């Protein structure tokens, strides 16, 4: 069996030599845009409406599967009673 040899070289960051720089970093100034609350409210309202529709659809699916399980439960009990 042949065992190949792999060589991995990692480039380490080079250290700067000499005295450290005396430059003081300047604080960055962030200019924020004013918030459009009307637009934000509309987006949130649309998202909420979509979540309500999705929740109602999931409730219908759950109800369907509960009915399906109940119907199969009845069949299982009937078949089990015939075995005994």
Image: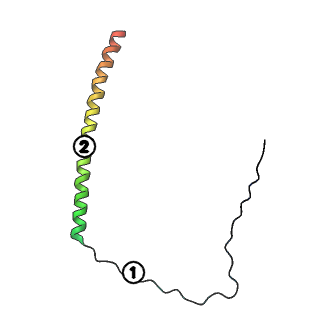
Image x and y of residue 72, in percent: 30, 23
Task: Decide: few, some or many residues near mark 1? Use Cα within 10 Å; few <14, some 14-19, many ≥20.
Answer: few
Q: Residue at x 24, y 53 (%)?
A: 50
Q: Quadrant of the C terminus?
A: top left
Q: Which of marks 1 and 2 is nearer the N terminus?
A: 1
Image x and y of residue 44, in percent: 25, 61
Q: Quadrant of the N terminus?
A: top right
The local secondary structure at tag 1 comes to loop
Q: Residue at x 28, y 28 (%)?
A: 68
Disc assigned to residue 57: 2
Q: In this view, does 50 lie above or below 79?
A: below
**Quarter assignment of residue 61:** top left
**Quarter assignment of residue 59:** top left
Q: Which residue is drawn at 33% across and 12% down?
A: 81
The residue beneath circle 1 is 30
Q: Residue at x 57, y 89 (%)?
A: 23
């Amino acid at each position: 069996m042949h065992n190949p040899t792999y060589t991995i070289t990692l480039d380490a960051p080079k250290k700067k030599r000499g005295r450290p720089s005396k430059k003081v970093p300047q604080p960055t100034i962030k200019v924020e845009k004013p918030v459009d609350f009307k637009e934000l409210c509309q987006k949130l309202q649309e998202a909420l409406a979509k979540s309500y529709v999705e929740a109602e659809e999931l409730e219908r699916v759950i109800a369907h599967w509960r009915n399906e399980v109940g119907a199969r439960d009845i069949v299982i009990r009937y078949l089990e009673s015939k075995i005994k």
